[in-house]
Amino acid sequence: MFLKKWSCQAAKWTSVLKTLPSGRAVAVDLPGYGGSAEPAGGEALSTAEKGELVAAAAAAFHLRRPVLVAASMSGGYAFPLLRDNPAAVGGFVGRGFHSSTSHLNLSRVH
């Protein structure tokens, strides 16, 4: 499951998705980016809500224990799920995280 990075949309992953087995990978726009609506009420999501959003997206696509691919600010959405429910994630690939993720305690991630 590919999560968008700052100032991009899920479509940015199209060329990568085309190289993977059909139906096995998806790209998700984060709230307020690409084709996704702003969070309800325009309020920023809490750290826990960000992780829950990723879990809900995986469930909506019927992905069981997805490998999360996160770059830049999308790490702030992937890390809470990794920290709070590591059994829900099959793997993680990350790169260049936004500074908003620096406050997360990842000591429980193995």
Image (tube, grey):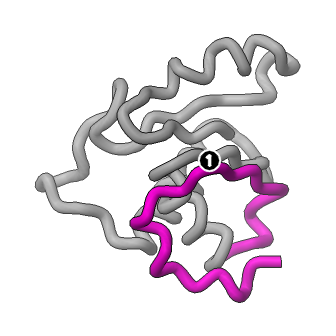
Which quarter shows the C terminus?
A: bottom right
The magenta-colored residue range is: 85-110
Drawn side of residue 19 relative to residue 38, left or right: right
Tell me the quarter of the image containing the N terminus. Answer: top right
The location of residue 21, given as percent across then percent down, is 87, 19
| Picture quadrant where residue 47 is located | bottom left
In percent of the image, x 51 and y 37: which residue is there? 4
Name the foreground residue: 32 vs 104.
104
Q: Vertically, is 60 above or below 101?
A: above
Q: Name the residue under label 1.
A: 70
**Secondary structure beneath disc 1?**
strand
Question: Residue at left 70%, top 40%?
Answer: 62
Q: Which of 88 and 109 is in front in this view?
A: 109
User: In which quarter of the view is residue 106 placed?
Assistant: bottom right
As drawn, 23 above or below 63: above
**For the residue carrying disc 1, how many other residues have a C-alpha within 10 Å: few (<14), some (14-19), or many (20+)?**
many
In the rendering, at what x and y percent does residue 77 appear?
A: 50, 58
Question: Horizontal placement of 55 versus 37: left or right?
Answer: right
Q: In this view, does 38 lie to the left or right of 74?
A: left
| Residue 27 sits inside the magenta stretch | no
Q: Residue at x 59, y 30 (%)?
A: 27
What residue lies at 84% left-to-right and 20% top-to-bottom? 20
